[in-house]
Image (cartoon, grey):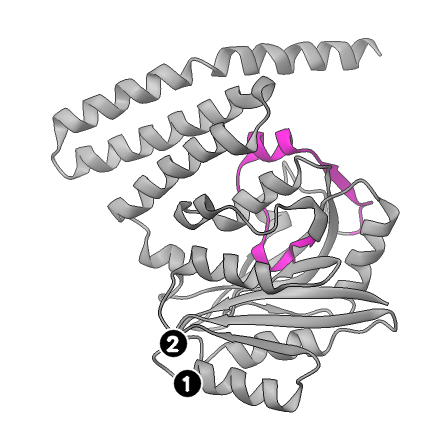
Amino acid sequence: MTKVSICTITYNHEAYIAQAIEGVLMQRGPDIEVEMVIGDDVSSDNTRAIVADYARRFPESIKPLFHPKNLGPGANSRACLAACTGEFIAALEGDDYWTDPNKLRLQVAAMREHPTAGLSFHDAETFNDEDGKVEWTFGEEFPHILPPAGSAPKLFSQLDFARYGWFVPTASMLFRASSIPLPVPDWFEGVYSGDYTLQLLSTRQGPAVYLPRVMSRYRIHQKGLGNIMAQSEDKFKRRIFEAKMFQQHVFSPKDRKHADVYLAMQYKGYARYLLSQGRRWTQMLYMMKSMYYDRQRLPIYLERRLQQFNNSKG
């Protein structure tokens, strides 16, 4: 029997959380045992009551974490991950949901087939919550990265994630628990993108295997964290902090140049924000910082061209 823990963070998701839970409970596989750890971050709506009801009806599968005070998404994720006891850990935020009852079975099988892989992920639909219309799939949005439906599984290295950035649906991620540091380090609470951070941490240990099959849905709505923080100064400061943590803790010394370029991008984005706020002198400071770290683009470019040349000779 393979135990899979599902790490679910939720806050004011009363309209969505039942759908997320039902997508977990419908998972099939005679050798799959699910443990859904749901961290409610002191919701002000009925989210907690809905979770409590499911936990009462399905105590063997639903493990609620009812925090006494609001932690924020980073600390909530850390708490949920720390409570997971499975060999594998899947991610599912409270406003997304799974659509394929064979999702976990297929992902676990892929991880068994690729024993060095730390992460499995798959395609997903992105839809608008207002009208239910599917906007795009991740495979359609990132055709230069993700192979089309029906293709063979594809492996991605940590440097692929560094090169391409964010292209993985959060609700598609299934980690080998041993591939991520548990407990997750405290600096994780300060990053902007927890899912991208976990992807980079996991792929330090081995590649990620992609299954070109739609098995979850990513919801776009006005209360989503991405929309709330879209142009906030906190977003840019968190991204800069995140890049510095990547420099110090995520990439090996020989690959730190990738973190430098990522930091340059964050400085540049913050500089544009500062200019829009009329803070010209501070904007110039951050532009200079971005130029300092952006110098690493040249060695990365030359390294890739050399690799392409060697591959063509082989």
* Left or right, 196 with reference to 309: left
Image quarter where the C terminus lies is top right
* Left or right, 103 with reference to 125: right
**Picture disc at residue 43:** 2
> On the image, which quarter does residue 268 sit in?
top left
Question: Viewer-proximal residue, 152 or 92?
Answer: 92
Residue 114 percent across, percent down from the top left: 84, 44
Question: Viewer-proximal residue, 20 or 64?
Answer: 64
Residue 23 within the magenta-colored segment of the rendering: no
| Amino acid under disc 2 | Ser
* Left or right, 270 with reference to 211: left
**Image position of 215 with respect to 50: above or below:** above
Residue 298 percent across, percent down from the top left: 50, 11
Residue 151 within the magenta-colored segment of the rendering: yes
> On the image, which quarter does residue 312 sit in?
top right
Tell me if I can see residue 120 in this picture: no
The span shown in magenta is 150-176
Question: Viewer-proximal residue, 295 or 58?
Answer: 58
Image quarter where the N terminus lies is bottom right
| Amino acid under disc 1 | Asn
Q: Which residue is mark 1?
A: 46
**Image position of 185 with respect to 42: above or below:** above
